[in-house]
Amino acid sequence: MDYKQMMRQICMQAKEAANSLMSLTPETKNKVLLSTADILLEEKESIIEANKIDLESGRGKNLSKAMLDRLELNEKRLKEMADALKQVAQLEDPVGEIFDVRVRPNGLQIGRMRVPIGVIGIIYEARPNVTIDAAALCLKSGNAVILRGGSEAINSNNKLAEIFSSGCKENNVHPYAVQLIPIPDRQMVSEMLQMDKFIDLIIPRGGKSLIEKVVSESLIPVIKHYDGNCFVYVDESADLKMATDIVINAKTQRPGVCNAMETLLVHKSVAKEFLPHCAEELRNRGVEIRACPIAKIFAPFAKDATEEDWSTEYLDLILAVKVIENFDEAVNFINRYGSHHTDAIVTRDYERAHQFLRKIDSACVLINCSTRFSDGGEFGLGAEIGISTDKLHARGPMALKELTTAKFIVLGSGQIRT
C-alpha cells in the first residue's frame, strides 16, 4: 500500500475543503453542529457497540485503567459530547472579527481580521471524544481537519467521524471538511508530518513519547501539549478544610486526565494539622501516596518518594507529597519539576495569592480551586482541542480563537505613498 500517496490524497481533499469552509456562514456551521448532536444521540447504541469492541481489545492488550477510562464511551459521556456540540454552536463565531483598528494620519484605517488557519492535523491516542471535539471546533473556526486517532479507538473513532460527516452532508457542507485517517499504521503519522504544503498546523494529544515523536519528525508547526504534572500548594494561611476538599477533588474526581493533581506541596507550619487527616481521606479513596521523609511522619503508610516522582504524570490514583519550607521554595519547586500545565495555591493571604499568579510559569494558574477546572468547557470556551503548554501561538485551553490566525486589513480612500 502506498501510504504516501494515500496521505497526499487526503491532504489535497482537506485543502479543497478548507477553501470552501472559509466562506461558510455562522448559521450553516451551527446547523452542522446541532445536526451532529442529534445524530450522535440517535446513534448512541451503535456508538457504544463499536466502543465495546475497542474496550475488549484494550483489555486484551493490558491497557492501564487510566487508558481504558479515557477510551470508554457510555450514555453519560455521549450526552456530554452532544452538549459540547450545542455549546460550541452557541458561541460567537470568531471568523471575520475585525479588531485593533486604528486610523493613521493619512486617513488609512488599519486593523486585523480573524481568519481560519486552514488545514489542521490532530494526532491523538485513546480518547474518542477528541474526534467530536476537534471536528466541532475546527468546523466552527472554519478549518478543515485531518484526524489520526490511536489504534486503541479505531472502531469508536470511525463511527464518530462518520456521524460528523453525516451532519455535514445534511447541511451541504464540503464532504472532506472532516476526515479520519482510516489506517492506524504509524507510518501514516510519519507521512502526515511531511505534508507541509497542505497542512498548516499539527496538534498532538497524548503521551510524552507521542508528542516528542511528532515534534522531532514534523515539517509542520506543532502546538505541544506536554505532561499534565499539576501541583497544588497548601500555603501556611490556607483554610485547611477547603484545602482538603480541593486536594481530594483534584486527585480523585478523575485521575486519568491531564488536569488532575499529581504532586501536593504543604507548608511546614500546617503539615502536622493538615496531612494526617488529608492523607487518610486520600487513602480511603484508593490513593497511593509517595512522600518525602517529613511528610511520611504524618502519613506513615506512605511509600518513599523518589526524585523521579516530583516530575511524573501518573494519570492514576498515585500522589507525590512534599513538605515545603516556605513560599519561595514552593514556587521554585513547581517551576523546576512541573510541566507548566496547571498549578494551584490554597491560601487566605491575598498578596501571597497574587505572588503565586505572577511567579508560576504555567499555562493555567489557579487560586483556591481544584486543578480539574483547567478545561475549555469549564472556562466557558466550549469544547477544546487540548491545553497547550507552548507559549506560541496559543497557551492554555485551545478553543475557537486559538484555532484562528489574523491578517492585516487596510481601508483606504485613494491614498498613495510618497
Image (cartoon, rainbow, N blue to C red):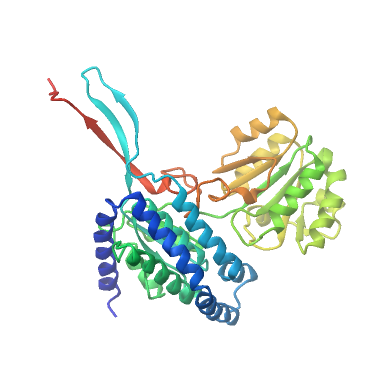
The residue sitting at the top extreme is: 105
Instruction: Give the tally of numbered discs.
Output: 0
Q: Does residue 38 appear to the left or right of 408 in the view shown? A: right
- Residue occupying image coordinates x 48% and y 56%: 86
Residue 55 spot, x, y in % from top left: 57, 77
Is residue 79 left or right of 286 when viewed as pictured?
left
Whether residue 352 is situated above or below residue 303 in the rendered picture = above
- Please tell me whether residue 389 is drawn above or below residue 315 in the rendered image: above
Residue 300 relative to residue 330: left or right: right
Camera-side residue of 329 and 78: 78
User: Residue visible at 58% across and 54% down?
Assistant: 228
Residue 8, quarter of the rendered image: bottom left
> Which residue sits at x=53%, y=58%?
83
Position of residue 211 relative to residue 62, above or below, is above
Residue 258 lies, in percent from the top left, at 59, 56
Quadrant the C terminus occupies? top left
- Residue at 27% x, 77% y: name it: 2
- Depth check, front residue: 40 or 322: 40
